[in-house]
Every structure is written in C-alpha cells, then in structure tokens.
Image (cartoon, coloured by chain):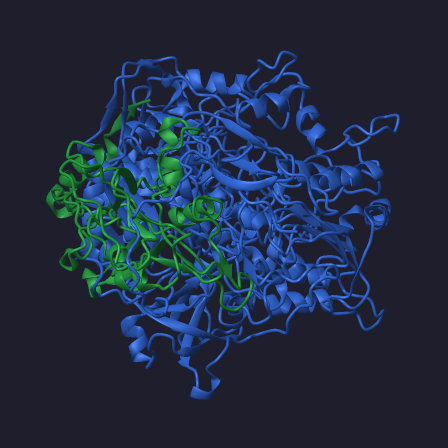
C-alpha cells in the first residue's frame, strides 16, 4: 500500500469525520435494484457557450440552464485553451454566480469611510455623481483622475477610455503581478511565458519549470504535464515548495527563493565552459555577433555599432570588415575586439556574454550554497539539458523559408522547454532573472524550435514591441496622445519632467521603474495619500481588492483610504469610486459603488489588443455573452464606462455632432476600430464576416462568434509553426492578420540596447537624466546583460534578525481568487496555515496546529502552523488570498477565513526603509514589480494563552444595506423548481 | 442485510482508473462532480452552513494531498477518493433496508433514497470513507458513477463519461469496463501496474489506482571541464571561440 499509510499533511482538501452510527435495524432486506432511475435526463433546457472568468485562464465553457437556473458548467471541447476540461474554479462558477455577497444596487456613502453607512441610490444618481466628480477633474487637470482596474480583462478598452479622458494615470494589476516576466521577455525575445508562449508539449523531451505554483495557464499546463509524463520526458520543478505541479515532477529542486537567476546563470556557465551552445542559432537569430561599442566614459559606450543607415553591424571574417549584421551568408565573428572605419572599437555581444558568465562567480561551486542546490546537481542538470538539446534534436519533416528567403527542408529543434512564472517575477531581481532564463533559451537554440518553448500568437513582436507610453502632455478637456502604457526604448521615452520628477502618480516609467510596463497599482494609494508627486482628486478602481489582499499592507492601505487632512477635514484621497460585483473588503472604503454583474451576465471580449488567448498553433480571441439577465439593479462595468465616456463627451465616445457613438459595450466590441480595419475582435470581420484579423466592422460579428462557440481561432499552416521570429511565411501572414507591423526578422536580444541607454544616462550622457540619488542604482541595474543580485531585503541592515524567507502560492482551486467567496471552494480552502519545514519547525518547538508569530521588519501576524518535508528548510509559505476580513463577502463574522485564515500581506510593505537614495519601493528597480516574495521573517511560538485566532483580526465590516443574510443551508438543485 | 447480485464471469464492471502519476491535486474532479450531481440523480448535494464558520457539504469525490516519507525520499501525493464500486461491498450487505444495492448489469453501487433510513451502517462498513450522509435529507448519498451521464441518450456518445473524468485537466481519470480484460481501462491497469486500494479488506474494489511512474532519470555523459578541453580559465575558454565564425 503505497499511499494510505504515512499521510501526515493535509495541504488542502475537503475532509470530514465519519458520521456517527445510529441504531441498527434487523428487518428483512428487500430485494435490491428496485429503484427507478432516469438514465437519460436532459441536462437542461438551454445551453449557451461563453468564456470563464473564474481566473485569468479564460477557458471556453458551455453553460447549461434549466428553468432559467444554471444546471451545469462544463468545458467546451472545441475551445483552443481548455479543449473541454474545466478546473475546480470553473466548475464552481455556479456558486460564484449565486453568491449571497453580490451587490444589488448603486451605493453612496453617507457615513465615514469604512463605517459601512451607505444609502442605495438609483443608477441615474450614481452616474450623475460620477460624471460630476470626473467632469470637474477633466475640465481642470485630468491627471487628478487615477483609474486603476485590477484584474480587468478589458484593458484595451479601459486604457482607451483613460486616454480619451486625458489622464496618464491608468493601469491594471500587472505591476503587482508579473510585469517582470512580461518585460523581461518582451525586451529579450519578443515574447514571454504565460500568455506569450508555451512549452512544445508535443515534442519536448526535457521540461524545466521555475517558480510556478498551480497558477497561470493552469489547464493547459496540467494537460501538457500529462503529455510529457506519458512520453517519459524528464520534468524538473525548481520551486521552494513541492506541491501541485512540483509534486509530480521527476526531480524537485527546492531552491532558495530569489536565487533562481543565479541557478540559471550557473547553468549558462557550465554550458559555456563545455561549449554546449547553439552557435548556428545564435548567429542567425540573435544579436550574439552584433558589435557593441567599447568607449568607456563616452556617450556611445555600450550602444550597438551602426552604419550610416542605422543598421547594426557585425564583423564579417571573410571581408575583415563590419557589415550589416542582417546580411545573409556572412561569416560573422563571435569574438574579438575590432576597429570600426571611424576608429571606434567594438566587440561582439557574445564576447561580453561569455566573458561575464565564464567568471568563477557563476560556477556551480560558487552559487550552490546560496541557491540551496548542490553544485553537482547543477552540473548534472546542465549535462542533462546539453545532452537532450544537442544529442537528441527533434527534426520535423516540414520545409520552411526564413526571412532571408532560404528554404529549409526540415525544422530542427532543441527539445528543452522552459516555463516560469510568479515565483521568478515577484522578486526585486525578477526582471534580470527572467532575462537570464531567456538568455539560456537562446544559447540552447530553444526559442520557437521543435521541442522547445513556442510563441503564442500574436507573439513574437518586435523588441520592444510597441509605442512608448503617452501622456507627458496633459491639458484640461483634452485626451492624451496615445495609450498611457507603452514600451520605452530609452530615457527619452520616460514619463518624467525635465527635472526628473515622475509624471505618473504611480511613478511607472520614471527612474524608479523605467520599464514599469504594466503601471504600479501597488503605489497608487500611498502616492495619492501623500500627494507624491502630486495630489489627485478621484481614485477610480475596478476589480482590485486594494483594501485587502491586493495591497501588500492592508492595514496601511485602509489607513490611507480613511485618513483626513487635518487642515481641511477632507479625506486625503478626496473621492473613491469603486466597481465590483461583490461585497469585497474594498467596497467598504469607497464613496460611490457601481455594482457590476457576474461574468455570466455580460458581454466581454478577450481581445488580441489586450491579453490574448492565442496558442502556438495560431491566434485566437473570444467573447462573453450574457447568459442570464441580472436579477438585481446592476450593470456591466464596461457599459457604465461607455455611459460615463458619453456623458463626459470624451473623443471617440461622441461624434463631432455630439451624438453618442456606442450604445453600449456590446456595440463597441464589434464597431470600434483602433485603426482602420483593426478592432477588439479579429474574427469574422468585413461586411461578409469572412475576414480574419483585419477588416471592416461587421454588425453580425457577435452573432458569428456566438454561433462559433464564442471564440475565434486561426490555425497557422504547419510551415508557419516554428521559427516564427524568422519565418517568412509566418511573418507575412502575421502582417496580414494585423499581429505585427512589418515582416522583418525579429532578432532576439541577448544584449538589450534600451538598457544600455538607461545606463548611459545614469553615467551622465544624454538630455534626460536621472536624479542624482538614483544614478548609481540605475547604472547598476540597467545592465544590458542579465545580472543577479540578492533580493533587496537580504542586503539590508538587520537582515540577520529575519532568517527565513516567506512566500505564498496560489492553490489550484482558488488561484486568482479575487472573487473566491464561494460556497464550494471555501470547503476546499477555507483557512490557511503557515507551512514550515519539519526540521526548522522542530527547532522552534513547533508542532502541527500550534500558533506562532510570523514577524517581519514591517509587522507581525499570528498564524497556525503545519509541518512539512517538501519545502526549502529556510522558507515558510502559505496559500495566498484565503484570508478574508471579517464581515466581508457576506460570510459569517466568525468564518474560518477571517478567524483562522490569514494574509501574509500583513507583514509586507510596498516600501523598504529609506536609504541614501531616499524612499525606496519594495520592488524590482527596472520594472517596479512588487517584490512579494522577497519577504524575510522570523517565527516565534505564541504563548499558550494567545492561541485561538489570527492577528491582526480587524473589526467586522458591516454589510451594505439591502444585502440579505447568507443562507444557513444550501440545497442547490437546478432540476427542481425552487420552493417559494 | 442486503444481498449482492450473483457474480457472473465476464460481467460488466464499470469503474474508474485514477492515475496518481499525473494527478496534481487540483480538485477539478471534485468540484465538477459536485456541480453535476447537485442537480443529478442524488440531488441535492446539500451544504450545511455554507457561508458560516463550519461549512460542511456532501461531496462524492474528495481529493487529499499528503506527504509520505521523509527527507529526500518524501513525496507529495495527491489522492482522489470516491466510491470504488467494490465487487463485494460491505456497505451493501450491511444495509438493513435494501437501499444500498449493487446493480447486476454494471456493478455500480447505488443508494435508493426512498428506501434509505439514514442509519449510517453503510458508512461504518465502508473502509474507504466513500459514503456521504446528507443530514438535511436524512439519507446516505454516494458516487453514482454519474449513472445519469454514462447511459444518457441525450448526450453525444463521447460525453457519456462521469463528470470527474470528462473535466480532469491532467487526464488522470479514466472510465470504462474493468470486467472486460480488453477494454482500454483494463489494458491501462495491466500496463501501468494498477492496484487495489486496501485489498486486504477483501471488498475487491472495481476502481483501480495507477502508481506514480518511475521517475525519469537521465545519465548523460558529464560535460567537459576547462582542464579537459585544454582551455584554462576564462581567457583560454574565450580564445577557443576566436576562430569560430558561423554563417548567418
């Protein structure tokens, strides 16, 4: 019996005691099998497809209804994301939809913030109030609106609204989620993990997964792991915690948090040492041979050498001359300092790269202790990777033509696939760690080649992919010149004033976070509260639980939302508008609440302009359609934004004659054109609905989507399946489909010139200069090649007092649980414990279910502990976002989520103690990504009389007026008419 | 006491094969089961105190995650648990009213709610903890193997599988006739060394579990170190590339 014995640890799961035995009976048994069973009940009387919104994966679902109630939600077999399967969250959608925590009517605060004193108002009044506040701001200083939209899946629309309003202060939640991953990838390979790329599940022979709990891309990853394991591919999980995906790995490396970059660079060291790198791939597809100017102290040091036409140069060994690096057929040098025609000296990228990572500091023996992975293991993993990559290539019998016009008879790839996610990105060194991972992929020739990692359409995109951020110039009543979020190419694209002062409230794209591509929602409350860099008037938020689990420090967050300016008696953040479908913690702290619908009551689009659902096989997008009419006085948030935009007469929302352009979001989805022919949805375009990608708006587009299962997919021809960055047919097709602007080869960037430009600025060159306090820091972190440095907390004074790492993971059944108050899911994860390695816990005198204090430099929380083996001994962890504030979500005041469950957030902070650079963010210095997993703590056993409930345990929130008490028993059965 | 159908050679034995190699413990099966069956044959799947301090509902399928072993030998095991539709189930024979019964035609063990008196003898008899008492309805409930799906003429044929099987993202659950040695599930059990849960109890479970596959271990040749390649130190290693020039 391999399983039943020895089980000690419950990581989660519904368990219950056996029922008690009642009186026995001795009557003679009747004959069995008399029961009449209806073997063929109709599942429902109606079925409609739509897109799930129980997390960010956006699986296709089929919703069966019976008598107007949801009978069953299942995966859509035809859908490109989930192919018929559905996870625990998706299946629990019924309980989400019927949650007793749903808001039912607009609310206007009448008491103090946090008091729960609201009055219900009509929509007309709510819209008038919002229009009044917003109109005043727009007419005077549009920057005084900060519009932040959390886990919004309509960012291409909400961002466009913000741009039309005229504020640069827009973003969604990416800044506190995974912008390191996006920025690291987009600035290196024109793609990334998660929505940007995936493992070649069909052909990979080696799979390295770093820092992934049971989260992003969850159903495709589960399906992919099953394929890998059935084929006998080796799967290595690198993660401080062994749960979920890591539990089924062939090998688990319980690495120390924040050292993954060092581990990767050690692999690079070993591969370089043994010359197991794919030079053919490097010369053709990367900038390995591109010449970097060597002119220490000069304004061009570290930039690429270019010809008069601006073409990057490489050294042609046949001509002994610098040539356009893109010239096909040239034999290009990997090493050697050369002198250019103008006398400047330059060196190929590869020499800089090899010269750095061959240094002994990157040897496995140098990093092993720090990583918690033995040197011999690192060397063995490198040897395994090298063997699979170079001795077991995958060759597909598929001709293709590269961007130089050369036909290749086969596609040959290195079957080493890598996937990484938040465990990598949520550190203050995450950007460079992501870059390091992509560098490893490039060195192996394992980027979009058979068996390796593959781009998901619409990626790859040019590097960097798009226009810079807009909004440097703001004027009353005027839109900004483009989208607020963009891609800086260098200092000139930063959102800073002439003196270096940030122009955005969140300070994204400033010298504190030059590549803050997703904005920095985690700084908004603090900066708005402090009036730094300026005061705002209206904070408008959607689907972001900033008063609780989305803030690193909920106590501080609610203090800042409720604190008044003693001089004026007004709140420091004057107006807060919030839209949510549920009574989340943040609702209690807003002034005006716009109740949203559930995901089954609305139109939505999952757009290629936004966060796409394409796969390696081709682009795809999707819609949501309303399946049920709201039984409450609520409106879809996007409809409300259309209405507000129209009332405010924003450009794009009203025509020249002042008439409204869009009746509602539904009409926007099919009618809107971002540029001629390109709209939110790429399928069924043109008057006849036959257009893919680009075409005139089609009034029948949404009908066509509904008829097609609420999604559109375009399957790339096989010859376009790999080498997309240099595949002529693919890139031409991508231009036709509107996915990229030109069909030029996308040269992968081992060496990042935009970073070199930031570094030059820090050294005093160029017109856009960082403030002096940030010079040294910028010069250090804007390194054009990947670097590793310890997470900031570890380098701080007094770090020894906090010897343990503290991280969180998302449970598979509750990942992205921003609306996870759910009668079924809470029975699986209704409370969380702090998991500690058995030896570590025993050293602290802790046993299962003991109470302990988890103490950081920011605060302390009292939690219940569980002991386990499968965790790095120097790391403690818990499930994320299980803990709720008492009273919220219409749960009982003493629900386990608030009484025992806890947030690790209470011991975190968005800020580090100031140093000689001034106020410091607890974030990645390049992207501003919140460094959730840098946390350092110590654990102390709680006194016996302290054990009972978690601390902090803030007072119960009061439910909004009109919210009925939650039922004490649930007999949900759609097959039976509800009893009146 | 309730009697069991006469065992017949070659009789159909419908059941599940659960793959512990690929189960990641995601609870997809548990929740989709709950969802289907909430409005299914044994509806409802009552939840007591659903929004209170001690929520406790009826679940036909529960997933437990354990650690087994210590140190480097420890492994995390995700273990889905539901009725095993035993060939000789004590939960049936112990039933005083005939409410618990085993179907002769396919071996599925069911509870006839109309005949169940809620005495819970069956739950005490079941060593697998697979029975679920609905205290609100006063009857015992359990996995029906989605009997209202697997024969359902209103569903396309490929959808006639238990909800837990059709929803599993990791393909860790399989459904079929374990009485037919040539069925896909029987072959899977044979190939992968599928095993019975607690066979010593003698209930002859129909459901099988597939053990984790042996870990894939590679034995690549060690990579050459600088001393072996003749290039000493960083400078030496770099020199080796000086003459390399590959055609773009």
Q: Is residue A546 left or right of residue A114?
A: left
Report which colour depicts chain B. Answer: green
On the image, the x and y values in percent for residue A422 come to 44, 51
Q: Which chain is blue?
A: A
- Residue placed furthest toward the right: A657
Of the pair B141 and B248, the residue shown nearer to us: B141
Of the pair A526 and A516, the residue shown nearer to us: A526
- Residue placed furthest toward the front: A28
On the image, the x and y values in percent for residue A296 come to 45, 45
On the image, the x and y values in percent for residue A750 come to 39, 38
User: Number of marks in the image?
Assistant: 0
Q: Is residue A648 above or below residue A946?
A: above
The answer to which image quadrant residue A789 occupies is: bottom left
Image quadrant where one finds the N terminus of chain A: bottom left
Of the pair A45 and A387, the residue shown nearer to us: A45
On the image, the x and y values in percent for residue A137 come to 83, 49
Res B239 seen here: no
- Residue sitting at 29 percent across and 43 percent down? B172
Res A568 seen here: yes
Q: Is residue A476 left or right of residue A786?
A: right
Of the pair B236 and A453, the residue shown nearer to us: A453
The answer to which image quadrant residue B132 occupies is: bottom left
Q: Is residue B184 left or right of residue A968?
A: left
- Residue sitting at 34 percent across and 59 percent down? A241
């Amino acid at each position: 019996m391999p399983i039943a014995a020895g089980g000690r640890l419950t990581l989660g799961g519904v368990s219950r005691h056996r029922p008690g035995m009642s009186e026995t009976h001795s009557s003679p048994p009747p004959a069995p099998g008399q029961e009449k069973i209806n073997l063929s009940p109709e599942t429902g009387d109606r079925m409609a497809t739509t897109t799930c919104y129980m997390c960010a994966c956006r699986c296709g679902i089929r919703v069966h209804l019976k008598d107007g109630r949801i009978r069953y939600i299942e995966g859509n077999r035809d859908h490109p994301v989930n192919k018929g399967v559905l996870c625990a969250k998706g299946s629990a959608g019924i309980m989400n939809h019927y949650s007793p925590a749903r808001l039912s009517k607009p609310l206007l605060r009448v008491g103090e913030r946090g008091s729960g004193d609201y009055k219900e108002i009509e929509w007309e009044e709510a819209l008038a109030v919002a229009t009044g506040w917003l109109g005043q701001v727009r007419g005077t200083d549009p920057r005084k609106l900060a519009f932040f939209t959390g886990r919004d899946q309509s960012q291409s629309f909400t961002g466009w609204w913000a741009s039309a309003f005229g504020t640069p202060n827009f973003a969604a939640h990416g800044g506190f989620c995974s912008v390191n991953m996006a920025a690291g990838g987009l600035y290196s390979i024109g793609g990334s993990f998660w929505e940007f790329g995936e493992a070649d599940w069909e052909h990979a022979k080696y799979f390295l997964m770093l820092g992934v709990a049971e989260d992003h891309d969850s159903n495709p990853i589960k399906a992919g792991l099953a394929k890998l394991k059935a084929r006998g591919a080796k799967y290595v999980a690198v993660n401080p915690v062994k749960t979920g995906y890591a539990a089924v790995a062939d090998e688990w490396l319980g690495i120390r948090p924040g050292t993954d970059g060092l581990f990767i660079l050690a692999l690079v060291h070993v591969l370089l040492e043994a010359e197991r790198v794919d030079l053919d791939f490097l010369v053709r597809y990367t900038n390995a041979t591109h010449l970097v100017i060597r002119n220490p102290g000069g304004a061009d040091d570290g930039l690429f050498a270019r010809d008069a036409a601006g073409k990057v140069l490489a050294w042609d060994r046949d001509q002994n001359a610098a040539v356009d690096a893109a010239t096909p057929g040239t034999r290009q040098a990997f090493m050697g300092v050369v002198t250019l025609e103008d006398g400047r000296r330059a060196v190929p990228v590869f020499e800089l790269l090899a010269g750095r990572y061959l240094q002994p500091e990157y040897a496995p023996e140098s990093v092993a202790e720090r990583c918690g992975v033995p040197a011999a293991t690192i060397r063995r993993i490198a040897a395994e990777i090298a063997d699979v990559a170079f001795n077991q290539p995958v060759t597909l019998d598929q001709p293709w033509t590269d961007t130089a016009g050369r036909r290749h008879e086969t596609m040959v790839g290195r079957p080493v696939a890598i996937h990484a996610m938040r465990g990598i990105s949520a550190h203050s060194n995450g950007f460079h760690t992501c870059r390091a991972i992509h560098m490893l992929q490039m060195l192996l020739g394992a980027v979009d080649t058979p068996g390796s990692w593959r781009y998901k359409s619409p990626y790859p995109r040019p590097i960097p992919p798009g226009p810079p951020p807009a909004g440097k110039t703001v004027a009353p009543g005027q839109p900004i010149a483009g989208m607020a979020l963009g891609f800086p190419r260098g200092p000139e694209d930063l959102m800073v004033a002439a003196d270096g002062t940030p122009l955005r409230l969140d300070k994204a794209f400033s010298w504190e976070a030059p590549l803050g591509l997703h904005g920095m929602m985690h700084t908004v409350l603090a900066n708005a509260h402090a009036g730094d860099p300026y005061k705002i008037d209206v904070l408008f938020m959607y689907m972001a639980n900033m008063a609780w689990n989305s803030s690193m420090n909920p106590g501080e967050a609610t203090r800042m939302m409720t604190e008044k300016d003693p001089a004026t008696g007004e709140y420091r953040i004057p107006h807060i508008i919030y839209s949510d479908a549920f009574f989340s913690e943040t609702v209690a702290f807003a002034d005006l609440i716009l109740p949203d619908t559930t995901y089954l009551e609305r139109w939505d689009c999952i757009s290629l302009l936004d966060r796409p659902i394409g796969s390696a096989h081709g682009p795809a997008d999707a819609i949501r359609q309303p399946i049920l009419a709201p039984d409450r006085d609520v409106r879809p948030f996007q409809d409300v934004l259309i209405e507000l935009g129209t009332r405010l007469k924003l450009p794009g929302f009203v025509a020249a004659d002042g008439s409204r352009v869009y009746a509602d979001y539904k009409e926007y989805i099919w009618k809107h054109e971002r540029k001629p022919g390109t709209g939110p949805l790429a399928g069924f375009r043109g008057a006849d609905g036959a257009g893919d990608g680009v075409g005139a708006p089609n009034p029948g587009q949404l009908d066509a989507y509904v008829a097609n299962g609420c999604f559109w997919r375009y399957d790339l021809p096989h010859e376009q399946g790999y080498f997309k960055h240099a595949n002529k047919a693919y890139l031409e097709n991508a231009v036709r489909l509107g996915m990229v602007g030109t069909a030029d080869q996308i040269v992968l960037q081992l060496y990042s010139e935009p970073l070199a430009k930031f570094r030059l600025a820090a050294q005093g060159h160029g017109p856009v200069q960082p403030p002096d306090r940030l010079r040294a820091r910028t010069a250090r972190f804007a390194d054009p090649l990947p670097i590793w440095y310890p997470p900031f907390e570890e380098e701080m004074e007094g770090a020894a007092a906090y010897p343990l790492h503290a991280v969180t993971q998302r449970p598979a059944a509750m990942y992205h649980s921003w609306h996870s108050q759910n009668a079924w899911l809470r029975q699986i994860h209704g409370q969380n414990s702090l998991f500690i390695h058995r030896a570590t816990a025993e050293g602290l005198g802790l046993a299962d279910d003991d109470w302990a204090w988890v103490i950081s430099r920011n605060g302390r929380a009292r939690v219940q502990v569980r002991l386990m083996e499968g965790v790095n001994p120097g790391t403690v962890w818990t499930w994320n976002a299980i803990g709720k504030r008492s009273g919220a979500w219409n749960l009982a005041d003493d629900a386990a989520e608030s009484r025992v469950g806890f947030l690790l957030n209470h011991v975190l902070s968005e800020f580090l103690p100031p140093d000689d650079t001034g106020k410091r963010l607890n974030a990645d210095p390049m992207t501003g990504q919140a460094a959730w997993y840098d946390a350092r703590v110590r654990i102390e056993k709680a006194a016996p009389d302290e054990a009972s409930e978690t601390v902090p345990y803030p007072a119960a929130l009061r439910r909004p007026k009109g919210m009925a008490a939650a039922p004490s028993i649930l007999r949900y059965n759609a097959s039976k008419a509800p009893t009146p | 006491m309730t009697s069991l159908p006469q065992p017949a050679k070659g009789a159909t034995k419908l059941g599940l094969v659960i793959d512990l190699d690929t189960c990641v413990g995601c609870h997809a099966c548990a929740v989709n089961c709950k969802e289907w069956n909430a409005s299914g044959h044994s509806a409802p799947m009552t939840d007591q105190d659903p929004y209170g301090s001690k929520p406790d509902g009826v679940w036909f399928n529960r997933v437990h995650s354990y650690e087994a072993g210590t140190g480097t030998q420890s492994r995390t095991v995700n273990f889905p648990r539901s009725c095993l539709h035993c060939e000789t189930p004590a939960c049936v024979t112990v039933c005083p009213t005939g409410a618990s019964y085993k179907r002769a035609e396919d071996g599925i063990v069911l509870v006839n709610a109309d005949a169940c008196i809620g005495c819970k003898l069956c739950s005490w008899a079941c060593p697998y903890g697979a029975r679920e008492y609905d205290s609100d309805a006063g009857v015992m409930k359990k996995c029906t193997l989605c009997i209202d799906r697997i024969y359902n003429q209103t569903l396309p044929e490929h959808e006639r599988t238990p909800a837990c099987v059709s929803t599993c993202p990791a393909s860790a659950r399989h459904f079929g006739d374990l009485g037919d040695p040539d069925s896909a599930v029987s072959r899977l059990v044979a190939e992968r060394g599928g095993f019975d849960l607690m066979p010593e109890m003698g209930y002859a479970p129909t459901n099988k579990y597939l053990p984790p596959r042996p870990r894939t271990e590679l034995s690549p040749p060690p990579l050459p170190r600088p001393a072996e390649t003749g290039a000493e130190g960083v400078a030496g290693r770099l020199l080796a590339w000086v003459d390399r020039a590959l055609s773009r």
